[in-house]
Image (cartoon, grey):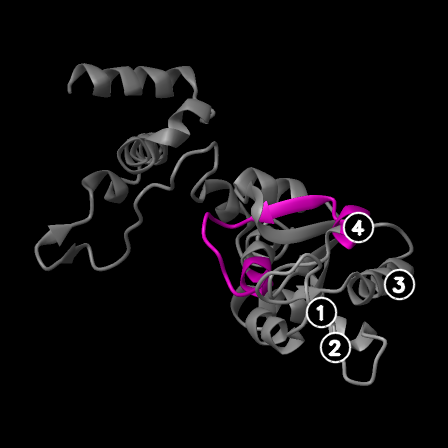
Amino acid sequence: MNFHVLTLFPEMINDGVNTSITGRAISKGLISVNAVNIRDFAGNKYGQVDDYPYGGGAGMVMQPGPVYRSYESIKEKIGYKPRVIYLTPQGKVFNQSMAEEFAEEKDLVFLCGHYEGIDERVLEMIVTDNVSIGDYVLTGGELPSMVMIDAISRLVPGVLNNDVSAEFESFNDNLLEYPQYTRPAEFMGKEVPPILLSGNHPKVDEWRRQQSILRTMERRPDLIKDANLTSADKKYIRSLEEND
């Protein structure tokens, strides 16, 4: 899978993705991350890509020309119109189902804005998806793009050492992940749940599923209504409600 990031700060992207899981995935050739400097397409010797907003107001706005030309350079390189994600607090909030959808793409382009934003005309011309990572404002789109690249990369086959682990992490079936334990079996008076030491794998799976449901109900009850629940899950939820 190929990620292309249109940015004013390519070094920020390169420094951020070339470590940990994404760094290993890049070195193995499972993903690629291409940081494209929008200033290289400024069309002037000063590398200026912003100007004052029409109508007045504070701050500066990124000009449409450099953004469009940087996008065109990617389109020409890959030979088709790719999906373009504009990182903006006005977009849909990113979640795991969106990560799964984006992971089906061969190429993804992330457009990182700065200053007071980007000229609306070029956004209308190239952007296919407006996405936010939360209801707050950041300096630019670089950090959100790296968050999304990390989440999407984990779903690319071969990126995780154990591909099965992606199936049981938080938000699988719209549920939070169950609690995890490792050695020692006792730590400062707190013991690992006995079921995990039993060797009874069907019972362990049942316990973990119930813990995922319980944790979701306690910490993110808003997720339960859209969770993919089995009849056994619903029976367990009813038992919890009856014992309240």
Mark 4, secondary structure of its residue = helix
Q: How busy is the neighbourhood of tag 2: few (under 14 within 10 Å), some, or many (20 plus)?
A: some
| Foreground label between 3 and 1 | 1
Task: Check disc 1 and report the residue beneath it.
Answer: 51
As for residue 124 lying within the magenta part, the answer is yes
Task: Check disc 2 and report the residue beneath it.
Answer: 48
| Circles 3 and 2 in contact, beta carbons < 8 Å | no
**Separation of marks 4 and 2 at Cα, in angstroms:** 21 Å
Task: Check disc 4 and report the residue beneath it.
Answer: 126
The amino acid sitting under disc 1 is Asp
| Circles 1 and 2 in contact, beta carbons < 8 Å | yes
Mark 3, secondary structure of its residue = helix
Which residue occupies 40% across, 15% down? 231
The amino acid sitting under disc 2 is Gln
**Separation of marks 1 and 2 at Cα, in angstroms:** 8 Å
Q: Where does the image place residue 21, in percent across and percent down from the top left?
A: 54, 64
Task: Check disc 3 and report the residue beneath it.
Answer: 77
> How many numbered marks are there?
4
In the image, 145: left or right of 107?
A: left
| Circles 3 and 1 in contact, beta carbons < 8 Å | no
Residue 11 shows in this picture: yes
First along the sequence among labels 3 and 1: 1
In the image, 225: left or right of 238?
A: right
First along the sequence among labels 4 and 2: 2
